[in-house]
Structures are given as C-alpha cells and as structure tokens.
Image: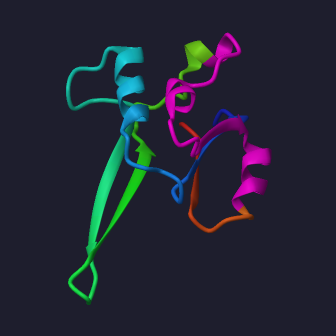
Amino acid sequence: MAKKHEYGLLIDYEYCTGCYTCQIACAQEYQWPAGMGGIRVNEIVQQLPNDKAYLTYLPFPTELCVLCKPRTKKGLKPACVTHCMSGCMTYGPIEELAKEMTKKPRMVLWVPK
C-alpha cells in the first residue's frame, strides 16, 4: 500500500518573478552538483502576434524533491518556501492547500512520492 502524504507544496504561478531563489536554496540545502536539484525554474517565452513576447516563469519540483524532510521534521519550512522572494510557494497540509487551489487558476499542488 502506498504511503499517504499529508503535506505538500502549493505554487502560485501568477506571482513568480523568476528570481531562481527557490532553485538556489534547494541546491545549497542539499549541496547538489550543478544542473541538479529538487526544484527547477522553467522560463517560457511566448511570441505574441504583435511582435511582442510574454515571459512566464514556472518553478516546478523535480523527482529529487522530498520537501526538505529533515527541515520539516524540525518544524521548519522547506528551503524553497523559506527563501521564495515573491511568496508564491506555500507548504502545508494537502487538504488546506487543495482548498486554496479553488480560488485561483494558475496554481499547482506538489505531493512527493
């Protein structure tokens, strides 16, 4: 039987500014080598019909993300949440985070394996 996870990570893409602080905080927390980490910020450039571009940043956890289990066991937030400069990441009980998702369209809820 699969283990039930009680906590997750909610990311509100509307407010991500692409500062990459979450990615850097994770890499430093776990001393990942370059190119590895528990979260990646994806930069997406969309070309608009009027010769303008729309830039979007999408932070998304990777398969390496364990939501900073050693930190959260001590009552601390995951490193990415603690250092997120725009405040677009929230760590908490899945049920509460799922309720928050109903309020806005551009959110994702991450629950590790």
Asked if residue 78 is among those painted magenta in the image, a careful observer would answer yes
**Coloring applied to the structure:** rainbow
Looking at the image, residue 15 lies above or below residue 71: below
Name the quarter where the N terminus is drawn.
top right
Total residue callouts: 0
In the image as oriented, which residue stretches furthest toward the bottom? 49
Looking at the image, residue 95 lies above or below residue 75: below
Q: Which residues are magenta?
A: 72-101
Front-lying residue, 93 or 25? 25
**Residue at horizontal 78 percent and vertical 55 percent from the top:** 99
Pinpoint residue 94: horizontal percent, then vertical percent: 73, 43
Pinpoint residue 35: horizontal percent, then vertical percent: 21, 32
- What is the quadrant of residue 69 in the picture? top right
Q: Is residue 75 left or right of residue 89?
A: right
In the image as oriented, which residue stretches furthest toward the top? 74
**Residue at horizontal 73 percent and vertical 35 percent from the top:** 6
**Residue at horizontal 32 percent and vertical 51 percent from the top:** 42
**Residue at horizontal 72 percent and vertical 35 percent from the top:** 92
Pinpoint residue 100: horizontal percent, then vertical percent: 74, 55
Q: Is residue 87 left or right of residue 96?
A: left
Front-lying residue, 23 or 55? 55
Asked if residue 43 is among those painted magenta in the image, a careful observer would answer no
Pinpoint residue 14: horizontal percent, then vertical percent: 53, 60
